[in-house]
Image (cartoon, rainbow, N blue to C red):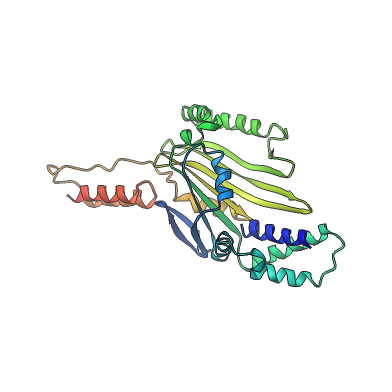
């Protein structure tokens, strides 16, 4: 029974791990489903995991997801026993009436019940936003990535496309199928998308997607993942999303979420005319400035300063 309790605990923690709205985090707007909210994430174990890859950079993490999941995660982070959660109690109550032949059958049943709950509560996907206080090169300088980042920054689009193929071949070399990345005996990532390129502002980015397979005893988790890594205001930022149920449109939802978060629109300097240029088109300048602010290219402080300069 202890193993079954552990399975329920891990499943709810990891799993619980049309209309839309914008959530603003660190001056970046994310277009998410209307049911989503966000919190600053303070899970030391998860932060330590990312900190290993991010040198001495200071990182901040945020969680976005359906309110019912975020509330559950917040309760767990505040020390509440997940087994006292209404969902866990419901599963345990049903389990008392079952007669499983072994732990494998029991774990499959638990997974099925958790997915039913998630579908019913519309808990489909969650996202983590990770901010560094340094650029990509400095953030990953302790992991031999800084030299690679320098090389990639010097490449044009054609060269990046070729280098992407080589990097994908390298990271999947253990499997030899250009797809699977075995992390250890229990974890594997199967890539469906892997692209390194630059946006119209010549900023480097990585876009990838795939399945994360995790074997834990008799339990198997199969999670759809999406990842986007780039720079914003000269600081590294990573967006990771995980989908557990109703994932057929997950990639489209992810792309929609980040579409206006990291502008792919060519930045043009807002021309601030001096007082001698009496024919300046102030309205046009303000419209352009407002567009840059809404797309996340300008911070609120930069927007206000530029606006004040135009009006003066």
- Residue in view at x 69 percent, y 31 percent: 173
Quarter where residue 180 is shown: top right
Q: Which quadrant does the N terminus fall into?
A: bottom right
Q: Residue 3, percent across and down?
A: 77, 58
Q: State the count of labels.
A: 0
Q: Residue 201, percent across and down?
A: 41, 38
Q: Is residue 260 visible?
A: yes
Tell me if 251 is positioned left or right of 205 in this view: right
- Residue in view at x 35 percent, y 47 percent: 298
Tell me if 268 is positioned left or right of 61 in this view: left
- Residue in view at x 65 percent, y 30 percent: 170
Q: Residue 269, percent across and down?
A: 30, 40
In the depicted structure, whether residue 226 falls above or below residue 34: above
In the depicted structure, whether residue 143 falls above or below residue 46: above
Q: Nearer the viewer, residue 246 or 28?
A: 28
Tell me if 176 is positioned left or right of 246 in this view: right
């Amino acid at each position: 029974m202890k193993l079954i309790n552990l399975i329920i605990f891990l499943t709810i923690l990891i799993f619980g791990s049309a209309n839309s709205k914008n959530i603003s985090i660190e001056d970046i707007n994310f277009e998410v489903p209307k049911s989503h909210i966000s919190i600053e994430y303070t899970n030391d174990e998860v932060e330590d995991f990312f900190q290993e890859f991010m040198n001495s950079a200071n990182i901040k993490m945020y969680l976005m997801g359906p309110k019912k999941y975020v509330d559950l995660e917040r309760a767990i982070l505040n020390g509440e026993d997940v087994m006292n959660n209404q969902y866990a109690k419901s599963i345990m109550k049903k389990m008392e009436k079952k007669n499983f032949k072994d732990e494998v059958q029991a774990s499959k049943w638990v997974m099925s019940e958790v997915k039913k709950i998630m579908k019913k509560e519309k808990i489909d996907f969650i996202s983590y936003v990770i901010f560094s206080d340094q650029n990509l090169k400095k953030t990953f300088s302790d992991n031999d990535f800084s030299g690679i980042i320098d090389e990639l920054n010097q490449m044009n689009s054609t060269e990046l496309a070729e280098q992407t193929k080589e990097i994908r071949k390298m990271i999947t070399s253990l499997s030899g199928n250009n797809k699977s990345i075995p992390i250890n005996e229990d974890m594997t990532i199967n890539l469906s998308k892997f692209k390194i390129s630059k946006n119209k502002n010549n900023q480097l980015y990585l876009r990838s997607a795939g399945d994360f397979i995790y074997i834990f005893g008799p339990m198997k988790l199969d999670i759809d993942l999406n990842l986007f890594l780039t720079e914003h205001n000269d600081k590294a930022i990573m967006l990771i999303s995980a989908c557990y149920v109703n994932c057929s449109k997950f990639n489209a939802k992810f792309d929609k979420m980040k579409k206006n978060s990291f502008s792919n629109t060519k930045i043009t300097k807002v021309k601030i005319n001096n007082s001698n240029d009496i024919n300046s088109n102030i309205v046009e300048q303000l419209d352009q400035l407002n567009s840059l602010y809404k797309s996340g290219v300008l911070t609120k402080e930069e927007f206000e300063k530029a606006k004040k300069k135009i009006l003066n």
